[in-house]
Image: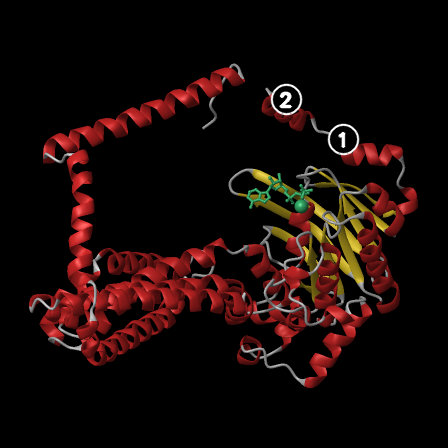
Amino acid sequence: MKAKYSSPQQFFRQRRMRLTVVLVILLLIYFGSVLLVNFNTFSSLAQIPAGLVWLFKTFIPNQHTTTYLGPIFYQLWRTLIVSISSTICAALLSLIFAVLGAKTTSPNRVLQLTVRFGASLLRNIPVVAWAMILLFSFKQSDFTGFLALFFMTLGYLTRAFTETIEDLDTEKLHALQAVGANYFQCVFCGVLPEAASTMTSWVLYMIENNIRDATLVGILTGTGIGFLFNQYFKSIRYDAAGLIVLLIAALVIVLELTSTQIRRAIA
Amino acid sequence: MLKVNQLDKTYGQDKHSLKSVSFTAQPGEVTAIIGPSGAGKTTILRSVNQLIRDDGGQILLDDQDIRQANKAELRKIRHHIGMIFQNYNLISPLTALENVLHGRLGAKSTLAGMFGLYSTAEKTEALALLTEVGLKDYAYQRCDQLSGGQQQRVGIARALMQHPKMILCDEPIASLDPKSTKIVMDILRQLAREKQLIILINLHQIDIAMDYADHIVGINDGAIVFEGPTEQVNEAVLQKIYRQSADAKVKVAANES
Ligand SMILES: Nc1ncnc2c1ncn2[C@@H]1O[C@H](COP(=O)(O)OP(=O)(O)OP(=O)(O)O)[C@@H](O)[C@H]1O
Ligand SMILES: [Mg+2]
């Protein structure tokens, strides 16, 4: 596709025109949906401060809340372990799938398509749906939560790893082939070292992400910090529920900081 | 001795890239392949170690036809053919030393290669080779932290680690400044002389080819139009090598409009 322009002025005029059209369409969509749902931006905006004040008043932990710290920390710990272990297990399997599924390293085309299709299937089922499906077979347990996170992460990481491998410079692999390296040697000595740092970043990101998701999954599977949150919330112990939210946020932030450190250390 | 006989290569249906290419390259000599862009230099070089599968002909290295080799034999043959590239193609997060050790992969068992289990002798040799190309102090440096000229020398050390009979070089100096160019070309010529290697090198710079090559192969539009000692190359020969075919002229004109 090669567009023809008679002058630069014409090129920029057309480009401005396209931008304007896109903006107008977006605005139309916005107003259309506002009309449909009867949503009024300004009055909703006005309600935000009052809502926030109420939130702060009820959910702020107080003196009494500290008595809940024991069970909260225990469940937080379990949730962390489930998130990390599900991510690591999924990452190991994803690595194998990605090598089999990436265009540049796949030993065979059928395998390549199977892996891609399987990964997108796993990925496109929301984690909540996973949890509900798995509940049938595995009942309410940590293991159900683990599996739900595992399957979704497997889908995500396989896709991410596949793309990481495909983005690598194939010439580097040719160089190893030229040396006389066979397939496995090319993968282990070339593909994995080149992809390692990007892949580690993905794994760390998925761990953070899975802590957040684990909370949601826990509400369904009746385990971990999500379960505890649900329990406090339903029994109107809002201060304790608020403390849980704060601690989850703190945990994710701590993880984010550590993963930045880890990434820097291995880069 | 490398002897290429009537090599043919067609990409896809009708893109005839090599037309019955024949030439020889002798041990102890630097043989340069020169020709305009798109003439088929890279295709020739990559056919020689079968990174590209050609369509017909013969490639004899010491009277063994590389094209007839099965997978295991090809791996053995490749182990004794070094290759260096314009973009160096080192594994960038690994150290210079590890990249040089990759030169042993063709000789190692699958598992030992996969997990990088090298013997002390191999490690010592790799370090000695890095010293030989003047990079002793950079052995434990990540390769993406080296300059282009240094990376290319790591590439040469990797090739030497293969105990090669021949080194193929695809525009090894195209990304280098004049000083690094001289270092790299000096090393390559010295290797030909001292170790009696076959050095086969694709070059864009005619002056470098004239300075360093003993033997010149000129290619134009997939066909060899000159082969002979460097002394025989004159203005007329160069015009023949770099002339544009009527066909190419039309294509260029079409692209520009
Ligand atoms: N993978 C490919 N598929 C189709 N055509 C190709 C492919 N690789 C090379 N060609 C064509 O074969 C011809 C020779 O290419 P080659 O890369 O060998 O040229 P070259 O002499 O190395 O050029 P340069 O000096 O620009 O590197 C070119 O016309 C090119 O378009
Ligand atoms: Mg080329």
Residue B246 in view: yes
Residue B81: x, y in percent? 70, 65
Please report the residue visible at 64 percent of the width from the left and 60 percent of the height from the top: B144
**Which residue is the site of mark 1?**
B243
- Report the quarter where the C terminus of chain B lies: top right
**Which residue is the site of mark 2?**
B253
Query: Residue B102: which disc?
Result: none
Q: Quadrant of residue B17?
A: top right
> Camera-side residue: B57 or A202?
A202
Q: Is residue B249 left or right of residue B198?
A: left
Say which chain tag 2 marks.
Answer: B
Mark sitting earlier along the chain (1/2): 1
Residue B141: x, y in percent? 67, 68
Q: Disc 1 to disc 2, how far (Cα)?
A: 15 Å
Say which chain tag 1 marks.
Answer: B
Mark 1 lies within 8 Å of ligand 1 (Cβ measured): no
Secondary structure of residue under mark 2: helix
Please report the residue visible at 66 percent of the width from the left and 28 percent of the height from the top: B248
Amino acid type, mark 1: Arg
> Camera-side residue: B141 or A4?
B141
Residue B252: x, y in percent? 64, 26
Residue lying at the far front in this picture: please name it: A63
Please report the residue visible at 77 percent of the width from the left and 51 percent of the height from the top: B23
Figure check: B217 above or below A223: above
Foreground mark, 1 or 2? 2
Residue lying at the far bottom in this picture: please name it: B120
Amino acid type, mark 2: Ala
Circle 1: is it few (<14), some (14-19), or many (20+) Cα within 10 Å? some
- Report the quarter where the N terminus of chain B lies: bottom right
Q: Is residue B11 left or right of residue A135?
A: right
